[in-house]
Image: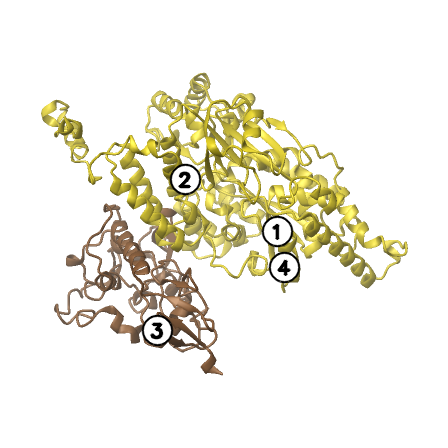
Chain colours: A yellow, B brown
Amino acid sequence: MKNSDAINVVLKRHGNDGTRLMQILRETQEALGWLSPATLTAIAAGVKWPRSRVESTAGFYSFFHTEPLGRYRVLWSDNITDRMLGNMDLMQAMCEKLWLEPGRVSADGLVSVDTTSCTGMCDQGPAILVNYRAITHMTMERIEQMVELIHNQTPIEKWPVEWFVIEDNIRRADILLTNAMPPGEALRISFARGAADEVETSFSERSWHESMQASDIGASATLDEIKKSALRGRGGAGFTTGLKWEACHNAPGRTRYVVCNADEGEPGTFKDRVLLTRQPDLILEGMTVAAYIIGASKGFVYLRGEYRYLLEPLNAVLAKRRQLGLLGENILGREGFNFDIEVHLGAGAYVCGEESALIESLEGKRGVPRNRPPYPVTNGFLNQPTVVNNVETFASAALIAAKGGDWYRSFGSARSTGTKILSVSGDCERPGIYEYPFGVTVRQVLEECGAHNTQAVQVSGPSGICLNRDEFDRRIAFGDVPTAGAFMIFGQQRDIFEVVRNFVHFFAHESCGFCTPCRVGTTLLKNLVDKIADGNGTRTDIDEIFHLNRLLQTTAHCGLGHTACNPLLYTLEKFRPAYERRLKLLKFVPAFDLDAALSQARQMTGRDDAGAHLETHSEIAQ
Amino acid sequence: MSETNTFILDDQEIPFTPGQSVMQAALTAGVFIPHLCYHPEFRPHGSCKLCTVKINGRPATSCTTPAAHGMEVESNTPEILDKRRTLLQMLLVEGNHFCPSCEKSGFCKLQALGYELGVMTPRFNLMYPTRPVDASHPDVLLDFNRCILCELCIRASTEVDGKFVFALSGRGIKKHLVVNAESGRLADTNFSLTDKAAQVCPVGVILPKRKGFAVPYGERHFDDAPISTHVDEFKPVMPGQGGRS
């Protein structure tokens, strides 16, 4: 098939709709290997967008490439948990066997190897993506086989199937993960709330007006249950779900949308992956209940690109639900209740986890957070009222719709009701998924996952909080230690500075670049931390970190910039020696390393003797 | 009841018409708030963050925040001036800014704000990004080395010229301007020197060819007085209107 034919097939599948640009770009890339300048021109013509706008979107996302990156693109997940499992040595070994440098394409254009932000496989790392398909448990043995397969140009479909097995590792299940409700149950009960007070009449006998009123009663009664449950958003911000849905319901609009945020990008978080695998019906049902309450007819699951392998299974569940009458027109025979859901795949951009950036991405644009207000509940997808909630929130809402707010409140604590799923990784015997009622102590989690000699726990990922040994009696709850789900454990043997360095690099890589303080500041922080790592740090550099933090916290455009300094701040306060032992006693040392700058000259002249080096700092110290 | 529509900006009472932003009201009243991505003719988007003020104690961009009666706005305080200086230093190290060789010197808002706010050093290490110039167009030179990513040319080309000549690509520190051509060359777009987008660059990226250093030192735009005294140039086109939308 010619390139232009392949592009046209994709364009046609998406009705030449520019708001579907992300899917068009991904599917075209899957067909053609990369997005060449001519391909972008053809796509722009197809969706009738200026070419510059198409290039703008394509250039934003890590998983779209506008340069050829080889038939095999290997990306090593670079979360700190992967590092602790030795991913850097393995990647280096792989590069040596393939005769290439990280970030470069092999001379024959066959393969490239690079790092990527956490792929959400922290309990089964070191993990990689090969052509955006997830492979876990990397070992030297697997690398040897893989290099062989790549050299022989064996298609990925013929690689050993066991490599692509993703484990759920559910270690503790509670109300969400033990759910066995048949699909449709929560919807039926929600509808019945409207009918309960009424005289028994079949739907066909009712006038349209009556049925709408009944629907309104069921919807408002179910909303009352959600409100009564005191459910709060599970994505990190903790906004009260019932109030969000009510605001969206009350907002004027032509139509309304329900969006499930499955862009689980916070390093160390993988609970949504397991929920999407084990409880897809519960999540989709929660979205449908939301649609019923707010009056939406269209929903999206924004699935992170790293979870590409979940696309087909989720589409199969959607198809099944359509068959069962749980999606589509007149859901469960309820006239006028039309709602369908579509999976939208992201393409490697952490910032799209921010709800307004996610909506921009859904519209085919760069994932840049919007100016707020207005908020998505009034001006969301295509400027219409939109509810955006986390995967776990929708799953919880479905349970509440079926079993009621009072039932839900019986779990957890008064102000943090229900359960929370933790993604446990790092130094412990049993990494994996742990669902607890809110209020569990950090210590209990550590005991149950088999963590010994724990030095620190990073809760809620790099943007979250770092707890030291004195704080392990604190509780996972909105009022104490809130979390989006990540729980990374660091044993006594770990160097906390290296943990922080990994996080700081992460923020620099993921800044969207919209505002000056975050775009430049995150890179300046990265440079400062690297300078300290290189042994050239001084007290002045520590002061500069605090100075930059004050700037980012007050002037950055969104949460990414506001929290980018958190890892540094928490650990400078609690793990100061990790920094101190690296610092020079001097007040100031320039970051510019004259001796390192001479390395090119040494390389060119083939010299590496003492005379080809400047005096080193350590020599001066002696 | 316009007399009830006022807010306090650094101890000065500023009147406003409903719908005006804090920035627009301040500029209309003749009070300068430093800015780079704001332009009176375009809808503000608040990316450069130089116009950050404190409103009732909370930081906010004055170009995107609607004025409200009774607000207390701090702008000219040591704390905020320090932040603005740092933001300018960030922009200065992010690109390649060498004023003595720049045709825009004396007319450049980045340079003028540097003088205004007393930026004496770059503070951070220069990043020296590689940003090739585009001299393909017969009438216009694009020197991306100086781009501060304010998006004014993008907004002008999109909203006024209807040409979409400019857009952003890349992410984070690698974000950069691109032009609307498969070749990536300005010559292959329908850009013209008479476009609005050719007039709005606050720094020295979009330059007319065959006309450089035409004004002698001492007579250049910002030679006479600091940028803050040029406040009339930044006043909203029509008071009370939020620019194009």
Quick check: do tags 3 and 4 share a chain? no
| Label 3 Cα crowd, 10 Å radius (few <14 / some 14-19 / many 20+) | many
Q: Mark number for residue A570?
A: 2
Q: Residue furthest left?
A: A611
Q: CA distance from mark 1 to mark 3?
A: 40 Å
Q: Mark number for residue A247?
A: 4
Q: CA distance from mark 2 to mark 4?
A: 36 Å
Nearer the observer, disc 2 or disc 3? 2
Q: CA distance from mark 2 to mark 3?
A: 41 Å
Viewer-nearest residue: A149 or B77: B77
Q: Residue B139 location, x and y as percent?
A: 24, 63
Quick check: do tags 2 and 4 share a chain? yes
Give yes or no for contact between labels 2 and 3 (Cβ–Cβ under 8 Å). Answer: no
Q: Can you say which quadrant of the picture contains the C terminus of chain A? A: top left
Rendered residue at 66%/42% (across/down)? A396
The chain identifier of the residue carrying mark 4 reads A
The chain identifier of the residue carrying mark 1 reads A
Nearer the observer, disc 2 or disc 4? 2
Q: CA distance from mark 3 to mark 4?
A: 36 Å
